[in-house]
Image (cartoon, rainbow, N blue to C red):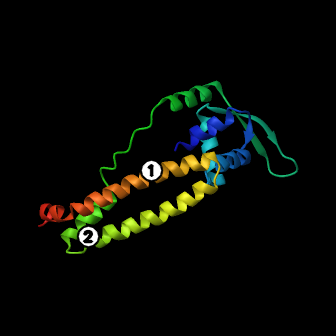
Amino acid sequence: MSIGHTLLGLLESGPRHGYDLKRAFDERFGHDRPLHYGQVYATMSRLLKNGLVEVDGVETDGGPERKRYAITEAGITDVAAWLAQPEKPEPYLQSTLYTKVVLALLTGRDAADLLDSQRSEHLRLMRILTDRKRRGDLADQLICDHALFHLEADLRWLELTSARLGRLAEVVAP
């Protein structure tokens, strides 16, 4: 995820302080990985340097200075271009799981146990996500669906690999 573009998009609704941007980000996108304040301010500094935001005001309110940021026309154009650009699908051709299966076979370890253990871990996480989806709002449901679909694809791969383990062992044997 592009944090800079996400913060710019949040600024399109109006100027905000860094604290407000962090809170809005965390509420909408950071359920599992909230932003650190330092990350927000470092990103805003870079966006300011690049002319994508400007300081709309500085407030003290008896405490430290708080800059209010506003998106510039260049920032709006940048967000529009980012939104229009399709994300590159990740083919996962360098799978850690595949590497572990092959190494288990090469070293005489039980690859079937490895696959069973991984299947159990996937199912455990799927139960957690399904529960979260049931209790969540629409945004949370969509995020969980995305993750669940990927886990389902992994499970299909685990089943297929288990079925082909004997042939794979013959192919990778030293």
- Left/right placement of residue 116 relative to residue 133 reads left
Q: Residues within 10 Å of mark 2 (few under 14, many from 20)?
A: many
169 versus 137 height, above or below: below
Which corner quadrant holds the C terminus?
bottom left
Q: How far is mark 2 from mark 1, CA to CA? A: 24 Å
Provide the secondary structure element on which disc 1 rests. Answer: helix
What residue is shown at x 44% (from left), y 64% (from top)?
123
Q: Nearer the viewer, mark 2 or mark 1?
A: 1
As drawn, 79 above or below 26: above
Which mark identifies residue 81? Answer: none
Quadrant housing residue 8:
top right
Q: x, y percentage for residue 10?
A: 66, 38
For disc 1, the marked residue is 149
Q: Amino acid at mark 1?
A: Phe
Residue 170 as seen in the image, left or right of residue 140? left
Q: Quadrant of residue 156?
A: bottom left
Image point 64% across, 56% down: which residue? 135
User: Looking at the picture, does residue 86 appear above or below residue 24?
Assistant: above
In terms of sequence position, does the residue under pointer 2 or pointer 1 come before the other?
2
| Residues at marks 2 and 1 touching, judged by CB atoms closer than 8 Å | no
Q: Is residue 48 visible?
A: no
Name the residue that disc number 2 marks: 111
Q: What is the residue that sits farthest to the front in this orientation?
A: 134
**Residue 157: x, y in percent?**
31, 56
Observer-nearest of 63 and 23: 23
Residue 91 appears in the figure: yes
Q: Quadrant of residue 104?
A: bottom left
